[in-house]
Amino acid sequence: MSISVSDELQLFAQEIHRFLSPNILRDLARDVELLLMKKKRELSEYKAI
């Protein structure tokens, strides 16, 4: 029996929700967003050179 990627991600999300509070999840999401924005800015600055 093979499990789909979608099903695997759903199980992973359920485990995260079981162990982390909504506030911690929100903070993690914000940190990831800031990191992605920083990387995008660095890439655009590098391309400008």
Image: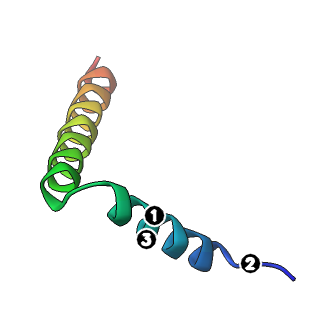
Which is more N-terminal, label 2 or label 1? 2
Which residue is rendered at x = 43% and y = 67% of the image? 13
Q: Which labelled disc corresponds to residue 3?
A: 2
**How would you rate the neighbour count of disc 1 (Cα within 10 Å): few for under 14, some for 14-19, many for 20 or more?**
few
Q: Nearer the viewer, residue 6 or 11?
A: 11
Q: Which residue is mark 1?
A: 15
Task: Give the SS element for disc 1.
Answer: helix
Which amino acid, mark 3?
Gln
Which amino acid, mark 1?
Glu
Q: Which residue appears farthest toward the bottom when viewing the image?
A: 1
Q: Nearer the viewer, residue 19 or 32?
A: 19
Q: Residue 29, percent across and down?
A: 22, 51
The residues bearing labels 1 and 2 have C-alpha atoms spaced at a distance of 16 Å
Horizontal side, residue 2 vs residue 44: left or right: right
Which residue is rendered at x = 29% and y = 32% of the image? 39
Q: Residue 1, percent across and down?
A: 87, 83
The residues bearing labels 3 and 2 have C-alpha atoms spaced at a distance of 16 Å
Q: Is residue 10 above or below residue 22?
A: below
Which residue is rendered at x = 69% and y = 78% of the image? 4
Q: Residue 35, percent across and down?
A: 25, 35
Q: Residue 36, percent across and down?
A: 27, 41
Q: Which residue is mark 3?
A: 14
